[in-house]
Image (tube, rainbow, N blue to C red):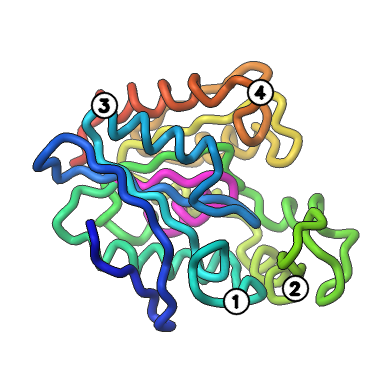
């Protein structure tokens, strides 16, 4: 995998490819969460675990994040759904599974509900109720002035807030998911309540599996990354990609 990934705005998306078994046409595309990037340790561990099991994996950073081109101030769920579509355009020879963490999980539900190129879906501590999330996490911030979680370069914008409020929730789109779907969520997730995953699960008619990791936080620490990786790899080997 050595071709550039370019979104429709002409922005290059940074990625890392983990080859699996020679000749495999399966591929798990891994998307990150709010203010994140492809190199978060638990995402690297997931990709490595999949590749070791023979399943190729592709970690991407959405536009405006880390090494990808574009402005962070233009980042939002709607643009990332579009970014994912551009990635799928470039991967037409593969059977695609998409695995999204946090906001990347909402991106996955929105894309998979309209794009049959996603053959399997994995949601890791995924945001479902986007309006509630932005109010809970950033409602105290002033758009255009304050940083998200005080991270340098991660300016909170009105456009970002408006996008999550307009989407409101992806629960309705969950009802349109028809492919095999794995949801993994920690019981001690303080950022995105585990109820988000339960609400998505209640709406879907897809063949879905829900794994609650007792005592686990939002980023699968401390010590929960191996359990998350084992759950995803085991499910991926068991469920056909279509």
Please report whichever mark, 1 or 3, sits nearer to the chain's N-terminal start.
3
Q: Position of residue 134 (x, y in %)?
A: 75, 57
Which residue is tagged 3? Answer: 53
Please report whichever mark, 1 or 4, sits nearer to the chain's N-terminal start.
1
Q: CA distance from mark 3 to mark 2?
A: 41 Å
Q: CA distance from mark 2 to mark 1?
A: 12 Å
Which residue is tagged 4? Answer: 222
Q: Residue furthest bottom?
A: 9
Marks 1 and 3 close (CB-CB < 8 Å):
no
Look at the numbered disc 1 and give the secondary structure of its residue: loop
Which residue is pictured at 51% across the width and 48% down the height? 39
Given this view, does label 3 or label 2 mark the residue nearer the observer? 3
Q: Position of residue 127 (x, y in %)?
A: 61, 47
Look at the numbered disc 4 and give the secondary structure of its residue: loop
Q: Position of residue 184 (x, y in %)?
A: 51, 30
The magenta region covers 97-112
Q: How many marks?
A: 4
Please report whichever mark, 4 or 3, sits nearer to the chain's N-terminal start.
3
Look at the numbered disc 2 and give the secondary structure of its residue: loop
112 to 23, vertically: above or below: below
Q: Quadrant of the N terminus?
A: bottom left
């Amino acid at each position: 995998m050595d071709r550039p990934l370019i979104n429709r705005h002409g922005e290059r998306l940074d990625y890392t490819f983990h080859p699996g078994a020679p000749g495999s046409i399966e591929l798990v595309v891994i998307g990150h969460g709010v203010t994140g990037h492809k190199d978060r340790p638990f995402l690297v561990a997931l990709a490595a675990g999949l590749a070791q099991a023979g399943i190729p994996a592709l970690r991407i950073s959405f536009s405006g994040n880390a090494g990808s081109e574009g402005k962070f101030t233009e980042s939002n769920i709607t643009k990332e759904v579009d970014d994912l579509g551009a990635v799928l355009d470039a991967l037409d020879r593969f059977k695609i599974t998409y695995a999204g963490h946090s906001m990347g999980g909402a991106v996955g539900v929105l894309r998979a509900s309209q794009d049959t190129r996603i053959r399997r879906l994995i949601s890791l501590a995924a945001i479902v109720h986007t309006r509630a999330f932005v109010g809970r996490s950033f409602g105290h911030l002033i758009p255009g002035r304050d940083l998200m979680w005080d991270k340098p370069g991660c300016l909170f914008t009105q456009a970002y807030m408006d996008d999550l409020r307009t989407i409101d929730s992806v629960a309705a789109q969950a009802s349109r998911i028809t492919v095999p779907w794995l949801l993994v969520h920690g019981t001690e997730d303080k950022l995105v309540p585990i109820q988000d995953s339960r609400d998505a699960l209640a709406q879907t008619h897809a063949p879905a599996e829900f794994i609650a990791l007792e005592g686990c936080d939002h980023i699968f620490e401390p010590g929960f990354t191996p359990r998350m990786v084992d759950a995803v790899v085991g499910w991926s080997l068991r469920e056909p990609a279509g």
